[in-house]
Image: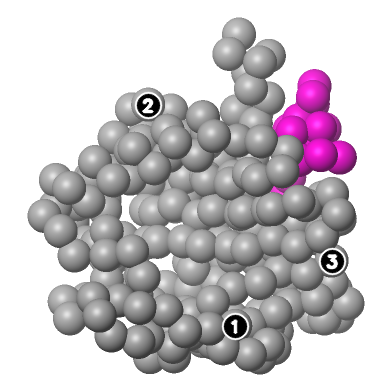
Amino acid sequence: MLSDFWPLLRLRLTTPRLELRLPTEEELAALAEVAADGVHSPGERPYLTPWTEVSPRQRAVHVVQQHWSRRGNWTIDAWTLELGLFYEARPVGMVALRGRDFPVLREVKTESWIGVNHHRQGLGTEARSALLHLAFEELGAASALTEIFQDNAGSQGVSRKLGYRHDGISRDVREGQVVVSDRLRLDRDDWQGTAHPHVTVNGIGIGPCLPLFGL
């Protein structure tokens, strides 16, 4: 079986409303269609890479290519675990947990997108909680980091709600203009000191799964 060689296919995170796991090829196509329908309101620009500002088909192709790339480029020194997000068994978006030199730094970053038709239901907060549970409780992370444009009220709200603290700013160039992001950090002690949705993790300890993270 393919999961004998890529045990992350067995990984499942479940919350009261969501399931997070690697998608099948058919499910990846369905997720691409969700992205094609839009992931934010018109006029918003929440990403430094303007992958959402292209045609619906180009958005869909980006989702597929990026997912394949992240699986193929996985190394212990730099990995990105990108999972499909399923609500009531329907694909609604994707989330990712990224690590660089994780066995030493013990830091992760998160990212996500959710189809615009599923916004304002608390799914983003619940999905991020699941990723953070995996990072802190299963992988032994020390901190989780994120960078969010200062005008991205939705993502800012999710991060603050989960206990992230301000950790400076970063400045980037987008189409010749400076854009400023807040750097936010959530440390393990702050995470463990707050309440979160119940998360069940299956498959993390099967086969050589943990060694893929350098553990």
* Residue 5: % across, % down: 66, 15
Q: Image quadrant for the N terminus?
A: top right
- Disc 1, disc 3: CB below 8 Å? no
Lower position in the chain sequence, tag 3 or tag 2: 2
| Numbered tag placed on residue 25 in the rendering | 2
Quick check: 165 left or right of 119? right
Q: Is residue 213 magenta?
A: yes
* Residue 175: % across, % down: 23, 76
Q: Image quadrant for the C terminus?
A: top right
Quick check: 37 left or right of 127? left
User: Distance between the Cα atoms at labels 1 and 2?
Assistant: 34 Å
Question: Range of the magenta residues?
Answer: 200-215
What kind of residue is marked 3? Answer: Ala
What kind of residue is marked 2? Answer: Glu
- Name the residue beneath numbered marker 1: 183
- Name the residue beneath numbered marker 3: 142
Q: Is residue 24 magenta?
A: no
What kind of residue is marked 1? Answer: Arg
User: Distance between the Cα atoms at labels 1 and 3?
Assistant: 16 Å
31 vs 178, nearest the viewer: 178
User: Distance between the Cα atoms at labels 3 and 2?
Assistant: 33 Å
